[in-house]
Amino acid sequence: MAEYLTTAPMKVNFKGPFKKNKMSKDQESIENNIENEELTPTGAPFTPEISSDTSKLDADMKGDNVDKLKADLAETKDKFLRIYSEFDNYKKRTQRERVDLLKTAGEEVILSMLPVLDDFERAFKAQNANRESEPAMDGFLLIYQKLMNILEQKGLKKMISVGGEFNVDLHDAITNIPAPDEKMKGMVVDDLECGYFLNGKVIRHAKVIVGI
């Protein structure tokens, strides 16, 4: 009986060599890419858009931008000086008005008392015209003097008009009469109602008669 030689089928592993060769090629490709890659130096920017070059900015700051800032500063300084001057003038004006208000605080009260002084003076003129001295009039004179002293302490001052030049800022001319002499022309001959000052301010004009 013929003997047949049988052999087991050979298993050829086709994956091993080809897979190894493929991995080798991939590794070589990666290494070549790494060698040929342009690395960014340490500290250098990645893109031109974020460049750290400030020369252009410095040039702008040294040029028109600086001139603009100087102009703005000068304008702001001018506005500040104007506001400061206005505020300083406001303070001075307020202080002056306050002082004037304190000086004339009792103006209305004093004005209301001036007719009483006028009555006293008319009574004294009538007494002098009659040339009679009465004890009662002496008492009235003391009261009048005491009242005038109190009002003078408050700043009241009697206006002396007779014999002086007529002044529209101080006098109200009631009428004109022939002057007794040439020197009295344009002068106050008599006053019908006395004028008064209060701390230098005219609170009542004198009613006078002017010579012509």
Image: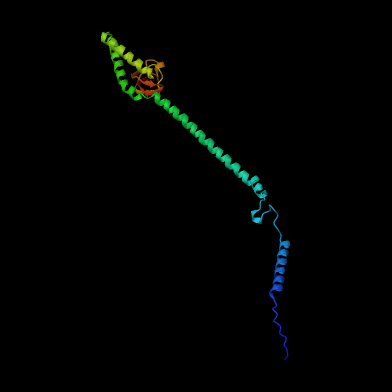
Q: Is residue 8 above or below residue 111?
A: below
Q: Position of residue 130 (x, y in %)?
A: 27, 10
Colour convention = rainbow
In the image: residue 200, left or right of residue 64: left
Q: Quadrant of the C terminus?
A: top left
Q: Is residue 23 above or below residue 94?
A: below
Q: Position of residue 201 (x, y in %)?
A: 40, 23
Among the 4 quarters of the image, the one containing residue 199: top left
Q: Position of residue 60 (x, y in %)?
A: 64, 48
Q: Is residue 13 above or below residue 4?
A: above
Residue at image coords 35%, 16% = 150
Q: Residue placed farthest to the bottom in the image?
A: 1
How many marks can you see? 0
The answer to whether residue 102 of the structure is visible from this angle is yes
Q: Is residue 64 above or below residue 36?
A: above
Q: Position of residue 207 (x, y in %)?
A: 34, 22
